[in-house]
Amino acid sequence: MRCAIITIGDEILIGQVTDTNAVWISQQLNALGVQVGEMVTVSDEAGQITSTLDRYMGRYDLLIMTGGLGPTRDDITKQTLAAYFHSNMVTHPEVLEKITTFFKERGRSMIESNLKQADVPEVCRVLMNNHGTAPGMWFEKEGTILISLPGVPYEMKGLMEDHVIPEINSRNKVPHVVHRTIMTQGVPESYLAVMLRDWESALPECVKLAYLPRPGIVRLRLTVVDKCASDAEQILDVIIGKLLDIIPEHIFGYDDITLEESLGDLLRERGVTLASAESCTGGNIARMITSVPGSSAYYTGSVIAYENRIKSGVLGVDPSLIEEKGAVCREVVEQMACGVRDALGTDTAIATSGIAGPDGGTDEKPVGTIWICVQYREKSFAKKYRFGGSRERIIDQASHAALQLLRRLLLSNL
């Protein structure tokens, strides 16, 4: 089965809102073995919506459309679909009752635009929305299923899970697909491909590999389809086992676990606590760690020592050392790590100091030069990195490198 995803909304086209719906829908369909051939965003104009449907109708087995089903005048999807399928608009009694109850339970009065949300094209099959007021709609024409869903992510996901995914799964024979994602840090995509050349060449024919990079992280997605699907888990276990022999120090988890989640699991498992002292990363490491629910069990806090007087006055870094060698050096981050451990009473520490740019670099220490120190009880390890890109990218890469360096120290992999 092949699918196209259509997102409706001027707010996406002008960059005001990021389209997360298409990505999520694609992930769900991919897990069912549905091949997504195209994603497109169109404006809130009837002509644009109609011409897009003309282009895709009959070419794809499935079209999923999101957006334009709200109660305001700019939401024109239902009226456009009614015209496209030569259908009258009718009031759906069950939807009307649900909307009325929805507002009554919240003590809010109904207005005409809310009542209009119960109007749907007569030819569609209504998908009841248990998470909001706008119903989903199911159409079929020229061998193509068209499903129209609200653009609000919470409502769209509810309708997908309640109606669309179960029916697509039951109505269509789709190939069985098994994915496994290996999360790596510390090697750029091009270098990683060279390191894994022989391993990749030896992959069975039914296993496909994709490199999925983002700043500081490369995901390796392995996919097994059809003829090997019955033995997929066993095949993937063997393949990943060989991968672990090649790059054990760079793998931090599987199936899209984040580095901060992986480190958090390890800290919790070991029963140890962590503090951070950040200069160039400006609290980004603290943000990443505390984004994990339950991180208070192992993370005590951070000192953002951006100015040198904070490094010395709060963390106890020797001022003469900074004067002699500058703030971006091994000795400074080592003293920062010791200082934050003593101040916050933790078992482990991370410290960063560097030049994130775009200014401040020298020939000796260009922009992107970052020193990171990690400590665990009596163990201490410091390393200099040279990152590239924008200020934001350098900070992101440094933060990921710091978390991975502490993971490796905890695992005695340094």
Image: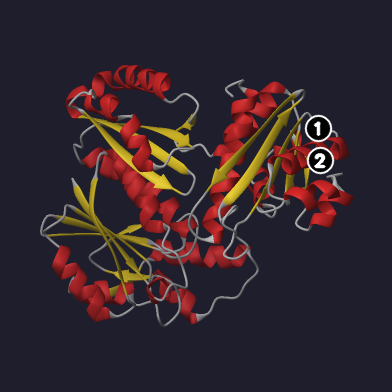
Residue at 85% over, 34% down: 345
Left or right: residue 159 compared with residue 168: right
Image quadrant holding the C terminus, namely top right
Q: Secondary structure at mark 1?
A: loop
Q: Position of residue 237 (x, y in %)?
A: 36, 19
Packing grade of label 1 (10 A; few <14, some 14-19, many >=20) is many
Q: Does residue 120 sit above or below 189 in this rendering?
A: below
Report, in whole angstroms, how far the alpha carbon at label 1 lies from the one at label 2: 8 Å
- 30 to 389, vertically: above or below: above
The numbered mark at residue 121 is none
Q: Amino acid at mark 1?
A: Thr
Task: Answer whether labels 1 and 2 touch (C-beta < 8 Å).
Answer: yes
Task: Please report whichever mark, 1 or 2, sits nearer to the chain's N-terminal start.
Answer: 2
The circle on residue 340 is: 2
**Amino acid under disc 2:** Val
Where does residue 343 sit, x and y in percent of width and height? 87, 40
